[in-house]
Amino acid sequence: QVRLSESGGDLVQPGGSLSLSCTASGKISSIASMSWYRRGPGRDFVATLTSTGITKYAEDVKGRFIISGNLAERVLTLQMNNLMPEDTNRYFCGMSLRTRAFTPADKYWGQGTQVAVSS
């Protein structure tokens, strides 16, 4: 059973910073990518980190958010700087991973952590 657990959400003032963390546990053979999403019509993409070290960001968070992680330790972080009220949302960790070698990767999700930006 794979489980993703997020933490770090909080209430901050505009211009403030937060660091979100996500830890994966359970039977994991390999991780292809680790990403952050936020609630939207479905889940809106925020940032991703691939197993080859490539990072991608949504346009509205470029220059403000930094995704980092350690696939071997199964830890993903999102450093959120210069937060704005429109960043208020629930943020989810998603990982494409394999529970067995030589099988297709499946997407797993955490329960999310709430970020609120308000004065």
Image (spheres, grey):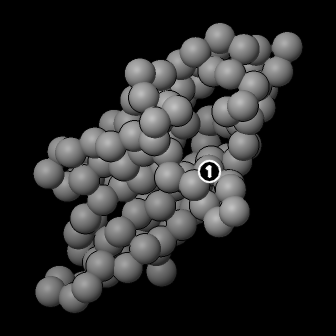
User: Which quadrant of the figure has residue 18?
Assistant: top right
Q: Which residue is mark 1?
A: 38
When the figure is inspected, residue 105 is found, relative to residue 18, above or below; the finding is: below
Camera-nearest residue between 81 and 56:
56
Residue at image location 33% in from the left, 43% down from the top: 56
For label 1, the SS is strand
Camera-nearest residue between 65 and 22:
65
Alpha-carbon neighbours of circle 1 within 10 Å: few (<14), some, or many (≥20)?
many
Mark yes or no: residue 36 visible. yes
User: Which quadrant of the figure has residue 83?
Assistant: top right
Residue with the most extreme front position: 59
> In screen coordinates, is 57 left or right of 36?
left
When the figure is inspected, residue 65 is found, relative to residue 102, above or below; the finding is: above
Q: Which quadrant does the C terminus fall into? A: top right
Residue at image location 30% in from the left, 48% down from the top: 49
Q: Locate residue 13, reporting x and y percent.
A: 76, 14
Count of numbered tags:
1
Mark yes or no: residue 22 visible. no
Q: Locate residue 69, reporting x and y percent.
A: 32, 42
Amino acid type, callout 1: Arg
Q: Locate residue 45, reporting x and y percent.
A: 50, 52
When the figure is inspected, residue 75 is found, relative to residue 110, above or below; the finding is: above
Residue with the most extreme bottom position: 103
Residue at image location 25% in from the left, 85% down from the top: 104
> In screen coordinates, is 92 left or right of 50?
right
Q: Locate residue 92, reporting x and y percent.
A: 58, 54
Residue at image location 53% in from the left, 26% down from the top: 80
